[in-house]
Image (tube, rainbow, N blue to C red):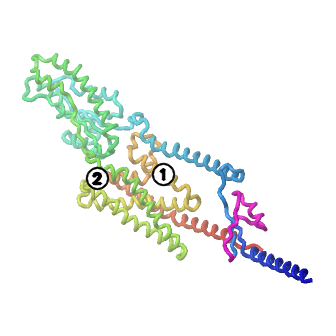
Amino acid sequence: MASADEEALNRAYTEGVSECMNKVVNKDLHVVGGSGSSTAESAAEYDGGAAVVEAKGQEGSAALQRMKTRFFSPKLKQHRRKIIWTFVFTNVLLGACVLSLLSIYWGATYKREHYMFKVNVLTVIQDESELVGTTMSAAIATLVAGVPCTWHVFNASEFREKYKVSSDQIDQKVLDLIYGEKYWMALNVKKNATNALYDSLTGGPTAFNSTNYFEAIYESGRDPTSVQTAIVPNMRSLEEVYRAYFVDQYLPSLLGNLTETPSPDRIIAALNLNFEYLDYRPFYDALLLAPLQVGLIYCLLLTFFQLSLFAPLHAEIAKVVKPRHMLFYRIGISWLTYFFLSLFFCTISAIFQVNFTKAFGRAGFIVYWMSTWLLMMALGGANENAISLILTVGPQYLGFWLMTWIILNISPSFYPLVLNNQFYRYGYAMPIHNGVDIFKVIFLDLSKHNMGRNYGILVAWVALNTALLPFVLSFVGKTMQKRAAAAAAAQKPTN
């Protein structure tokens, strides 16, 4: 009897312990990564593979966690498909970016000699003589036909009539035309060149010096990378062709018509025929390549940095101010930041002793600073609008925008448009192209005749970007609100 009572008591104890443990497990067992009705079902639904249960003491906590598996596990089939698709899409996108965007930059220097006909060169032949039937410079009008570029040849009377100047004003007018960027180069053959040669060979007081009568004029400051390397060599080609004509044909013919043989030293001096090259606005310091070229890429990137640094603050302020006030806040913060950022940027050139006084005297630095501020507002405004949209719809494509914006700006700005395809004429509307033109005036004292257009285009960019900003902020705000509402709806428990 006692044995039966003890057995019943043990059975009741065991059932009570089991029921208690079931309650603990049902209350404190948490499944991570699954959604089934039981632990076994939750583990089975996890597509990453296996799971483990971790016991955490008497307080009763167990966690089902993901475990890593081998790459070629059958359970990672969907992941491998995603990897392959992303790999193919990414490489196609990068390839398209390289082939399209970088081709724009490479194309800016492609077959420059093919576009040399667009380079206009002025040739003024003032030389006239009553002592010799054919002047020494008469053949130049014919010889230029075999040299690249488009040569505009005038004799003295034609030039006076076209530009309404007197004979004494021709030399200065030629300089003015080069300075005014009407021509890329000029060859000015001055008056009495043939008479001076004749006098030197017939007992005159001085030997003939061709550099006093043949003057080639250009401005390397107009383009530091191309004028000396691509344009001036055409003038040197003409010089070589003309020298060969003079030595082989003209001078022997002239000597044959003289009654007396000149002294050898006078003949040697006459044979030494060269042009005098005048770089009217030289590119005098390689240091200027920094603020005129590569430095402007950094200028563009700095406008992006300020936006990324202010982004957390902008997001916070957007939650507490009205849209109109948010617009004024964004514009004010950006423009004020560019004001000080442009000062820091310009100070670098001052530290390295760039000369700001050539065009505007002591006010040169202020002109440079204000021009850089305007350029940053033009570049930064476009950055702010584009980046705000990209971060909203596809943050992963941000790098493509920066690369596109940089290449579109520098391709028509770092090389002369005269040696490029017509496609690059879009560069006249780009902020950096107009900034470069302004900075060349400041640093190199080039002609100021285009500064009004340059500043006008930069102001137009600022106005356009400012006008678009309200629409951009509105789109971004509405998109973020929709996403927040969708996320809240997804988290709301269902009945």
SS under mark 1: helix
Quarter of the figure that contains the N terminus: bottom right
Picture coordinates of residue 332, whole percent (x, y)? 44, 70
List the single residue furthest toward the front. 2
Would residue 370 be visible to someone looking at this image? no
Picture coordinates of residue 103, whole percent (x, y)? 49, 42
Would residue 171 be visible to someone looking at this image? yes
Q: Amino acid at mark 2?
A: Phe
Determine which residue is flagged by label 2.
Answer: 443
Q: Residues within 10 Å of mark 2 (few under 14, many from 20)?
A: many
Front-most of residues 370 and 340: 340
Q: Amino acid at mark 1?
A: Met
Q: Residues within 10 Å of mark 1 (few under 14, many from 20)?
A: few
User: What residue is shown at x 18% (from left), y 20% (from top)?
Assistant: 254
> What range of the chain is rendered magenta?
33-59
Q: Earlier in the sequence, mark 2 or mark 1?
A: 1
Determine which residue is flagged by label 1.
Answer: 403
Say if 227 sits above or below 38 in the image: above
Picture coordinates of residue 392, whole percent (x, y)? 57, 62
Picture coordinates of residue 386, whole percent (x, y)? 52, 59
SS under mark 2: helix
Q: Quadrant of residue 395?
A: bottom right
